[in-house]
Image: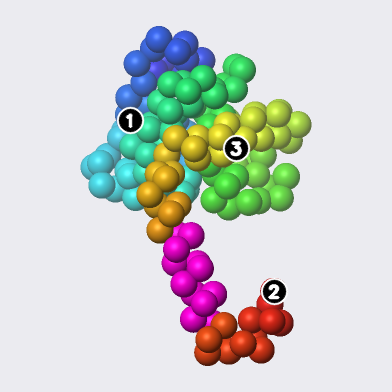
Amino acid sequence: MTSRGAKRKKETIVEVEDFYRIGKELQNRSGTNIGAIHNEDRRFREFFGCGARVALAVWTLLIQYDYLPDDGMILHMLWALFFMKVYPKQEGGSSAAGGSSGVIDPKTWRKYIWPFIEAIAYLEQFVVSYFCMLILTYITISYVVVLYQTHPLYLSLII
């Protein structure tokens, strides 16, 4: 990738190294080379809440299901991942989003993170399996039944 957060056309092949490179800039580590993959992935996970391969998978799914926001770039998706992990106040988040380039305007930051957060949420129907949803529903119902049998008064208080 030639420049920070360069716009990607849908046909362009994106690699995990692109995520590491842009992530390093957001972490103020742009002057260093990509190190050992396990160290880079640990740092990426600590900053964005998921590994670079997971971020690449999300990016790919956004393109595949046509949920990629208008003018959306990898950089903007990483801003959204950072926001979802840390949930910072506006000034702190926009400052961190600037990385080694300095502060991003809070209005610009909000303009790009919310469409990505919504788009990622829309992917739920494609990534959460129906089987898992059935299992979670069964576990929840089983828990409520056991709770009712052991503590009927407690259950009446929380319902």
Q: Residue at x 54, y 44 (%)?
A: 82
Query: Image quadrant of residue 114?
Result: top right
Please report the bounds of the magenta region as a residue range.
136-147
Q: Is residue 63 above or below residue 29?
A: above
| 26 lies left or right of 17 | right
**In the picture, which quadrant includes the N terminus?**
top left
Check if residue 143 falls in the magenta segment. yes
Q: Secondary structure at mark 1?
A: helix
Can you see residue 47? yes
- The residue where tag 3 is placed is 117
- The residue where tag 1 is placed is 16
Q: Residue at x 34, y 16 (%)?
A: 13
Question: Which residue type carries mark 1?
Answer: Val
Q: Is residue 121 above or below residue 47?
A: above
Separation of residues labelled 1 and 3 (CA atoms)? 20 Å
Q: Which residue occupies the extreme right position in the image? A: 107
Q: Residue at x 53, y 89 (%)?
A: 150
Q: Residues within 10 Å of mark 1 (few under 14, many from 20)?
A: some
The overriding secondary structure of the stretch rendered in magenta is: helix
**Residue 64 position within the rendered picture, expressed as x and y whole percent measured from the top left:** 43, 21
Question: Which residue type carries mark 2?
Answer: Ile
- The residue where tag 2 is placed is 159
Q: Is residue 70 above or below residue 40?
A: above
| 114 lies left or right of 29 | right
**Mark 1 vs mark 2: which is more N-terminal?**
1
Q: Residues within 10 Å of mark 3 (few under 14, many from 20)?
A: some
Question: Which residue type carries mark 3?
Answer: Ile
Q: Nearer the viewer, residue 127 or 104?
A: 127
Q: Secondary structure at mark 2?
A: loop
